[in-house]
Image (cartoon, rainbow, N blue to C red):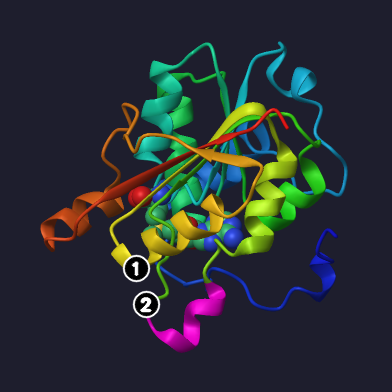
Amino acid sequence: MPENPARRSVRSYVLRQGRTTPSQQRALDELLPRFGISFSDFFLNMKEIFQRMAPVVLEIGSGMGETTAEIAHTNPQTDFIAIEVHGPGVGSLLKKIEFLELKNLRVIRHDAVEVLEQMIPEGTLAGIHLFFPDPWPKKRHHKRRLVQPPFAALAARKLAPGGTFHAATDWPEYATQIDEIFSSNSLFEKQMQDRKGRPVTKFERRGIGLGHPVRDLLFLRRKK
Ligand SMILES: C[S@@+](CC[C@H](N)C(=O)[O-])C[C@H]1O[C@@H](n2cnc3c(N)ncnc32)[C@H](O)[C@@H]1O
């Protein structure tokens, strides 16, 4: 049963104020109308957005967007939709889209669960990327973690058969949780853990600096 977003009160993020630099603000003002997609409760028409039919990969929580832009730049045959709620991060990614003249990357500034539920047609995504989601380490905050059984069910509905869910985290206990939840959903088949050419992200660099072990988890959406 799809969750009713209107009743969803626990979210996986807290909107931090954080400083928006003048150039990020310019990007939000001038580039979001060009490279952004507004949140709506209509399914997206990918052909209209990207002016072609190509595999579409959705990234949840693109942060400052370096890795997102790099992946899109090196995979021109695939289209990407990045979702992020943090304004400075969205501004920073928009600047990269402009600089690299990326035609295969668009941004949605909104809660990823609502975007998945309401904007992504069923069975259409070639991939979902979730790189270094907020680990919410305190036990009383675990309910804020994005990856819970209903999230795996939602991902299964939106991925095309043969599509992949790729997560990475430097928080071992969250890695175990992701592994257990996706492994126990019969619509997913665990793949050999591999970073699949994933470039290092900003958060990953920070984690490595702190000596955290990084783990990638890859699950294939079964054909049925
Ligand atoms: C720890 S950061 C990692 C950013 C980036 N992936 C990286 O590895 O550098 C997690 C990001 O996910 C975003 N985020 C968390 N939950 C989200 C949600 N439900 N919808 C959209 N963005 C979300 C946060 O705003 C934050 O920028």
Q: Quick check: 84 above or below 45? A: below
Q: Quick check: 53 above or below 59? A: above
Residue 147: image quadrant is bottom right
Q: Residue at x 37, y 59 (%)?
A: 175
Q: Is residue 89 left or right of residue 187?
A: left
**Rendered location of residue 9, percent (x, y):** 71, 78
- The foreground one among 135 and 35 is 135
For the C terminus, give its image quadrant.
top right
Neighbor class of circle 2 (other Cα within 10 Å; few <14, some 14-19, many 20+) is few
Q: Is residue 15 left or right of residue 67?
A: right
What segment is highlighted magenta in the picture? Answer: 137-144
- The foreground one among 167 and 15 is 167
Q: Is residue 17 visible?
A: yes
Residue 10: image quadrant is bottom right
**Rendered location of residue 98, percent (x, y):** 47, 27
| Cα–Cα gap, marks 1 and 2 | 9 Å
Q: Secondary structure at mark 1?
A: helix
Which residue position holds label 1? 173
Neighbor class of circle 1 (other Cα within 10 Å; few <14, some 14-19, many 20+) is few
Of the numbered discs 1 and 2, the one sitting upstream in the chain is 2
Give, as a three-letter code, the residue at label 2.
Answer: Pro
